Image (spheres, rainbow, N blue to C red):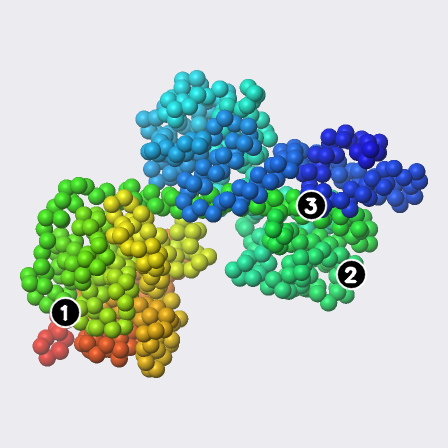
Amino acid sequence: MLATSLTCKFLFSPYDILFLLTILAPRTAFVSFFKLAVTYAVCDYFSEEQKRILQDIEYQTSAAYKRLKSQAMGTDTKRDAAVLQLCAELFDPDAITLQVKIIKYLQEQTDAEIAFLLLNDKDNNDLFCQVVGDTILQEEVRIACWGSNSTLLQNENENTTFGAALKRKEPISEKDIPNNKIKELEKLLNISIQTFLCVPVISKADESLIALVCVVNKAEESRFGPDDVHCIIHYDLTKLLREIMQEARNLTHAERCSVFLIDTETEELVAKVFDGITTNNSEPQSEIRFPRSHGIAGHVATKGELLNIRDAYSHPLFYRVIDENTGFRTRNILCFPIKDEKGCVIGVAQLCNKKTGPCFTSFDEAIASAFAVYCCISISHCLMYQKLEVSQQRNQLANELMIFHMQVSPEEARQLSTETVNFNEMVPNFDKFIYAPRWMPEAETCKAVVAMFEDLGFLTKWRIRNDTLIRFILMVKKGYRNPPYHNWIHAFSVAHFAYVMAKNARLHEYLDDLEIFALFVSCLCHDIDHRGTNNSFQVASQSVLAALYSSEGSVMERHHFAQSMCILNTEGCNIFENLPSKEYTRVLDLMRDIILATDLAHHLRILNDIENMVTEGYDKKSVKHHKWLLCLLMTACDLSDQTKCWEVTKHIAGLIYQEFFSQGDLEKALGHKPIEMMDRERAKIPDQQISFLDNIALPVFRVLARMFKECDVCEAAVVANRCRWEVICKVLQDRGRMTIDDVLALEFDSNEELIGLAK
């Protein structure tokens, strides 16, 4: 009856009315607008104002209906429920499980028999597939791109291949691929193809290809169409927010619309796309942020209730800063919350300046309430794809490290397992602070690490299999690249200092066995896959690492920990495999905290706490004291080269400045000005070394010596090396600037007199 009445005036069929209702919102959210529409439709008398409003509603509803229907949003609440259910299930940490769930969803929404993802591996110039339909492949299938031996993928001029999808980033179907190439794909993936749709997924950051999404064999022998393309490609959050804003403006005749999402970590409202500032996809992405509790949007976000304000500037909650920043004049506002399926506010939409009236009406409020549910479903759906994109970035980095760098041959493992050596007997002072591990030949270092594990009792205490330990050590060694300083020899030296501390400094009186174990393993792993550049460079160069970790801080340190976990998760390499569940979880947490502590910014933040802990006395029952001590020990191990003889310290300075100058050259190539210590033309090496020792190294070893009397020798060595750098500084004042080679050529005789000066 009601649907028929609506049809008389709106010219929609009952099916269309049902379609529109289920698209925009559940009945409970749309009921007020529905009742108003029905009242107008069956009423015998209309005033001129009512007729105008009814015509306006008819026009906007019709436009929204056509637009939504053309975008293939679901035709009933089952699709909405499916999206919400999928979002709730996307909690998996690994990319393959996420692929399985998303592939299942795509198959259901496109009525495809099979779906799969061809992920782009830029480094190897090929595509790889890990999941086909509901089947996880035993070995990933790789398809080489153009310029290789593959006939499946050729150059962009051959538009009868995947070239169009890869180069021009356009969807293709089975009509665009010759039969012989379809046969090749069938054979490669063990599937039968009748109908086929391939849609490229593009990164919003740099317009590069992330993956090809492929669906195969549409149900009932029909073909894939534009609706299926939209279902696959509609994932970019910024683009989606623009569509939501445009839709909201059209529905309510608003001049401007902005959508704010809640950043739960910072408790801020974030407008990634602010109407009137960012207008198209080609412009740089900018954000407006303000505290969640500020202004009208903040009030709606906090209370979760719609707010309709007739005069913005007279309202006490109006936040004028945004108007001041944008130059826009706000007259009236309709602000409404966007809630998830649990009723939690995830964002706020704010409409400004009604164009066809003095203020927003009750009809606008009803439309906004219904539209908010559509916003929630769309945003949740979009974030799902962003989560997949991040997961694939992690997978790409893991593949780069594990496949390219870290092949451990059986012969290597067998050779190391048969060469056990007692280094304390063969190498004088190996377990003493005065020993310089950097002078050990690299070929002997892995055997030395095995010996240290055995000497500290880790193999017996934690039931580590000898073959597992050997594979773990070899994998860690291969995980290091070969920059001048941050390489495997550095990791070995850092781990050796932890070993010497455990042997000489009574660590067992302060830490438990698992903490000492975690410290030693963390020292070995703490710089895995270091690229010879620091965190600032990763962010400035917009690297993949920065994309993954910059929001969390400590970019490189988080990457080092992630790669350590990759090694531990590699078959036959998990030295923690026999730990009880509770200890297993704890040792991974300890490793994360210890490796993150190698960020000197983190060290400087907690240095006062560490000094107070030493002054007031170490409390073995305090969890904080245990954590601070582990951080102090890790930093001391990382800086332990400064506690060795002058020859070692001088050598280390040369390696560090090679890395610094290399990064400085890269920064110059990017158009940036490097800081002085990284600029080979401006660096004052002795001055900077003294500054480093005064501000970083000496405070660490002074605190360490106060806590462990055995470490007095370490503090004394740092002080002695500082004195030598000071002598060199005075020489440079007299002789002028010297190169790093000139500095490193300087020697001191037995009377601490400087020798080796060029005439």
Q: Residue 371 has which mark? A: 3
Residue 61 drawn at (x, y percent): 75, 39
The part of the image, by quadrant, that contains residue 733 is: bottom left
On the rendered image, what quadrant is the N terminus found in? Answer: top right
Which residue in the protein does label 1 denote?
A: 432
Spatial CA span between label 1 and label 3: 71 Å
Mark 1: secondary structure: loop
Mark-to-mark CA distance, 3 and 2: 23 Å
- Looking at the rendered image, the disc whose residue lies closer to the viewer, 3 or 2, is 3
Which residue corresponds to the image point at 32% horizontal and 77% vertical from the top-left? 618
**Most distant residue in the front direction:** 580
Up-down: is 73 above or below 509?
above
Residues packed near mark 1 inside 10 Å, few (<14), some (14 to 19) or many (20 plus):
some
Is the Cβ of the residue at disc 3 closer than 8 Å to that at disc 2? Answer: no
Q: Judge whether residue 417 can be spotted in this image.
A: yes
Identify which residue, 36 or 699, lies in the foreground: 36
